[in-house]
Amino acid sequence: MKIALLCALGMSTSLLVDRIKKAAADRQIEVEVDAYSVDDMDEQLKTADVILLGPQIRYKQNELYKKAKSANTPIAIIDMKAYGIRDGEKVLDQALELLDQ
């Protein structure tokens, strides 16, 4: 499973990447997860199984959700509390729930 985390520059979400990878490894879930700039959205839609957005780019939600829907890629804004405390477990759960829908 490939999870793409998108934020303004790909920097703040990169802090969350390692925690998601650890949570997945602890559960023996094979996952590829990386952080990208929101400007990379079109490229990520080609390969990502799920896209999660940093809360700070919520203002672009309508535009990004339309693109994701056209590409049939699940998308959501990362829970603000989980993002703030870098809760890799909760963010991984959010990605897995999106894939199950």
Image: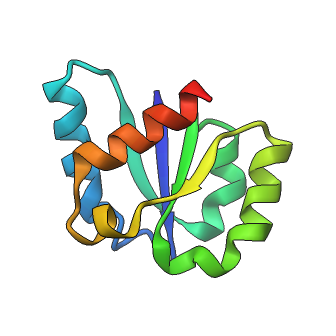
Point out residue 13 in the picture as x, y percentages from the top left corner. 36, 65
- Quarter holding the C terminus is top right
Q: What residue is at 48 percent from the left and 73 percent from the top?
A: 55
- Residue extending farthest to the top is 28
Looking at the rendered structure, the number of numbered marks drawn on it comes to 0
Q: What residue is at 33 percent from the left and 73 percent from the top?
A: 12
Q: What residue is at 59 percent from the left and 75 percent from the top?
A: 58
Point out residue 50 in the picture as x, y percentages from the top left corner. 56, 40
Does 64 sit left or right of 93 as displayed? right
Q: What residue is at 72 percent from the left and 54 percent from the top?
A: 42
Point out residue 89 in the picture as x, y percentages from the top left corner. 24, 43
Q: Nearer the viewer, residue 35 or 58?
A: 58
Does 44 sit left or right of 65 as displayed? left
- The type of colouring in the image is rainbow
Point out residue 66 in the picture as x, y percentages from the top left corner. 82, 57
